[in-house]
Amino acid sequence: MSELRNLRVALLGSGSVGSQVARLLLEHSEELSARIGAKLELAGIAVRNLDAKRDVELPQELYTTDAERLILGADIVVEVMGGIEPARTLILTALQQGSDVITANKALLAAHGEELQAAADRVGAQLSYEAAVAGAIPIIRPLLNSLAGDNIKRAMGIVNGSTNYILDSMDRFGQTTEEAMQIASDLGYLEADPTLDVEGYDAAQKAAILARIAFHTELPADAVYREGITKITAEDIATAKQNGQTIKLLAVVERVEREDGSEGVSARVYPALISREHPLAAVHGGKNAIFVEAESAGELMFYGAGAGGVETASAVLGDLVSAARRHVAGGPGVSFKSYANLPVLTIGEILTAYQLRLTVADQPGVLQQIAGVFAENNVSLATVQQSPSKDTADAATLVIGTYRAREAELKATLERIAALDAVLSVDSTLRVAEVSA
Ligand code: NDP
Ligand code: HSE
């Protein structure tokens, strides 16, 4: 039997994800070789600090601080160091020399995905990033390959585990935002800068990557409309519960038909009310899920671990095996084309149903006055619930649900309502997730 060919793998980073990638590569080396038809040789691991104490024990001689040197001549480069630089330059160098690159770096892909893909295409190398969106969940490859013959209408997902953990703990265990956030931090779900999670930046980066692939359209992360979860209160969660709903931070990427019949793409991240009967409402703790609606395939749900070292390493290894098989089979890597480049719509162009909670004076005629403002602004009311205010004497809490309305019209309505003497406070404004009939 002929000797199996060696494929040199350079690993950039040995943190939560990288250390697990290295461990799995070494522990499962024979099985991986059998699946690939070539041996994966871990050529080295680039880190910042050679003396750092590490949770996963790996041969010390593999470590280096010279990432530039490590990638020279590598067949496959795995980037799990994070951040923009030096990751971007290292990946570009690797691609230019014809190495396949696997990255889990959502921030880099959201900002420079087009540049990296172009560099891969120039030499026929493969750029893969399954782990960048929703950790272990296969979503990139299904969109790129399995659904390549279909048309995606919408993908709506929970793509940030820590905010899901926080909202879910508030909903199920009655924890305060602060309590839930502390536990999410202790469990290691939060980014080093938790603002990235709670203000929706992390989810927006993932939404940008999803929108790009689903709609073949370049879409930078800062074109994603973004609201985080910091304004969500225990009262919002309780009201949602009473109405058979829960609140989730949703990333929604959608192909939208405009009034003139032309098409555009919308990508947005915000906390939204969703029926407890929707599959996304059953995504608990730090788990992620993406609900995809395709023209022919219909509704598909992808669920699992959105973070975690070993879980994310599984997705990296999947890309690694795939890249290695390409080396064995020969031929260029599968390219990705943003051929459609649909216009990216602003949030003002999107129709959404809303739910508002107001504290109003408990007097005759107030409801009529408020309903009049909605009508004047072209926002149609769907439901109105009134109950005595728990906090304010002689006041009532109004929970008003609207039909789909434009952001601009809703804003104008809210401004007028807030200025009414009878309206004591506008306590919350939440979007309601759109679900198929
Ligand atoms: P960590 O911070 O745990 O690890 C980063 C690793 O990269 C460390 O080993 C660090 O070295 C090394 N590193 C950082 N900068 C440099 C540099 N300039 N030169 C050499 N080495 C460097 O990150 P994670 O493993 O958590 O994340 C890695 C990537 O995976 C990120 O892009 C992240 O967004 C993505 N990701 C992570 C998930 C997770 O659950 N953790 C889930 C999905 C994606 P040293 O150890 O010496 O400090
Ligand atoms: N902070 C991220 C999350 C990690 O909470 O989902 C995985 O990308």
Image: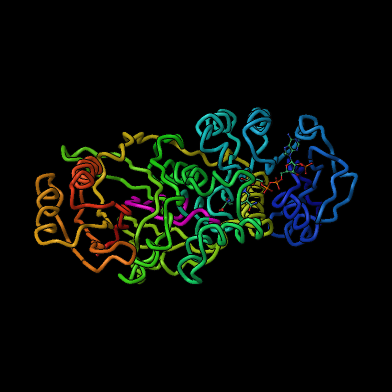
Task: Say if 96 sits above or below 192 in the image.
Answer: above
In the rendered image, residue 422, in percent from the top left (x then y), is placed at 18, 52
Q: Quadrant of residue 243?
A: bottom left
- In front here: 247 or 291? 247
Left of 335 or right of it: where is 72? right
Q: Quadrant of residue 84?
A: top right
Residue 413 appears in the picture as rendered:
yes
In the rendered view of the protein, which quadrant contains the N terminus? bottom right
In which quadrant of this rendering is ligand 1 seen? top right
Magenta residues, start to end:
145-162
Question: Would residue 153 be counted in the magenta stretch?
Answer: yes
Q: Measured from the top left, where is residue 300 in percent x and y? A: 40, 62
Please say if 46 is above or below 382: above
Q: Nearer the viewer, residue 135 or 153?
A: 135
Please state the horizontal and vertical placement of residue 186, each as a whole percent of the image.
66, 59
* Res 238 quadrant in image: bottom left
Q: Which quadrant is home to the C terminus?
A: bottom left
Q: Position of residue 393 (x, y in %)?
A: 27, 63
Query: Considering depth in this image, is 232 or 109 the residue closer to the camera?
Result: 232
Q: Residue at x 50, y 50 (%)?
A: 140
Q: Position of 385 compared to 72: left or right?
A: left
Residue 355 seen: no
Q: Identify the residue at image location x=54%, y=58%.
A: 137
The residue at the point 25 percent across, 52 percent down is 424
Q: Residue at x 64, y 37 (%)?
A: 83
Task: Tell me if residue 408 comes above or below residue 357 in the rendering.
Answer: above
